[in-house]
Image (cartoon, rainbow, N blue to C red):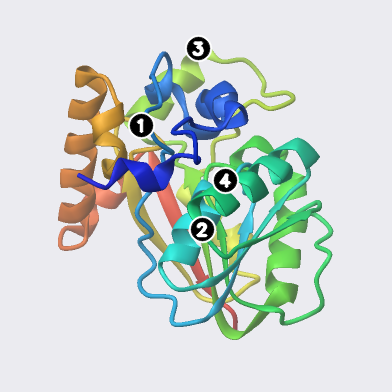
Amino acid sequence: MRDEAEHKGDDGAVDSYVRRYVVKTHGNLYRDVELTRYPIPDFLLGPGEGRSLLDLGSNWGRWTIAAARAGYRATGLDPNEKAIAAGQRVAAELGVDAEYVVGDARSLPFSDASFEVVHSYSVLQHLPKKDVLRVVAEIRRVLRPGGSAWIEMPNAHGPLNLVRRTRAGEPTGFDVRYWTRRELREAFSSIGPVELLADGYLTINPQPADLDLLRRRHRAVVRVSETLRRASRHAPFLVPAADSLVVRATRA
């Protein structure tokens, strides 16, 4: 288990903003969870080796911090000023060198070819699909040639998502919009070649690094999800059954 001290502030407490909005940023698995440390995931993109990375919809910065710890020059972007302020506080508490910027993903405040990697997790699913297409165009613009986008999105045909869709009406506001694999390929192909990878099963936010924080039944879900995700690397037929997909697109 990780050293819990590195996930807390100087007084041993988790930032109040993180505690208040953990369900919004992490999902229902974290409902009624008592945070004894910052829930920061493992970063699965491999060593950063000093590459520049933009984390879209960073909120308080769990993925921005994870990327920075993996060796990326990480910048988190979010339209919420309070979330950005919380990200700056948490990064300072943890001694992590990361930059945070207030901005809109549909009109990124960065010059062309500014980043080698663009990352986003459980964010674009909340935007109307026409707005996501604007974001994709901006991702392409700020990526350097040969750079890659790594975007998590919900699979419309995942078992959990099929159930949720039958219960939900037409999405409005912050509701989740579900995407078919065909829609994802078409939307992100403007960046370059697209690959779809499994991210999660029976949930859209499985983080094995947080098992110690979760309730027992939710730990079981995450363990099953991680087992299937690893298996999907060697058994591609499992990918269409994932509830959470990663869209990986390389800038042509």
- Identify residue type, mark 4: Val
Q: Position of residue 194 (x, y in %)?
A: 48, 69
- Rounded to the nearest angstrom, the CA distance separating label 2 from label 4 is 8 Å
- Rounded to the nearest angstrom, the CA distance separating label 3 from label 1 is 16 Å
Question: Closer to the camera, 26 or 19?
Answer: 19
Question: Closer to the camera, 175 or 161?
Answer: 175
Q: What residue is shown with label 4?
A: 90
54 left or right of 182 in image: right
Question: Closer to the camera, 153 or 99?
Answer: 99
Q: Residue furthest front?
A: 11
Q: What residue is shown with label 3?
A: 167
- Identify residue type, mark 2: Gly
Mark earlier in primary sequence (3, 4): 4
Is residue 166 shown above or below 114?
above
- Rounded to the nearest angstrom, the CA distance separating label 2 from label 3 is 44 Å
Q: What residue is shown with label 1?
A: 203
Q: Residue at x 56, y 15 (%)?
A: 168
| Local SS, label 1 | loop
- Identify residue type, mark 3: Arg
Q: Quadrant of residue 186?
A: bottom right
Q: What residue is shown with label 2?
A: 95
Q: Residue at x 81, y 53 (%)?
A: 103
Mark earlier in primary sequence (4, 1): 4
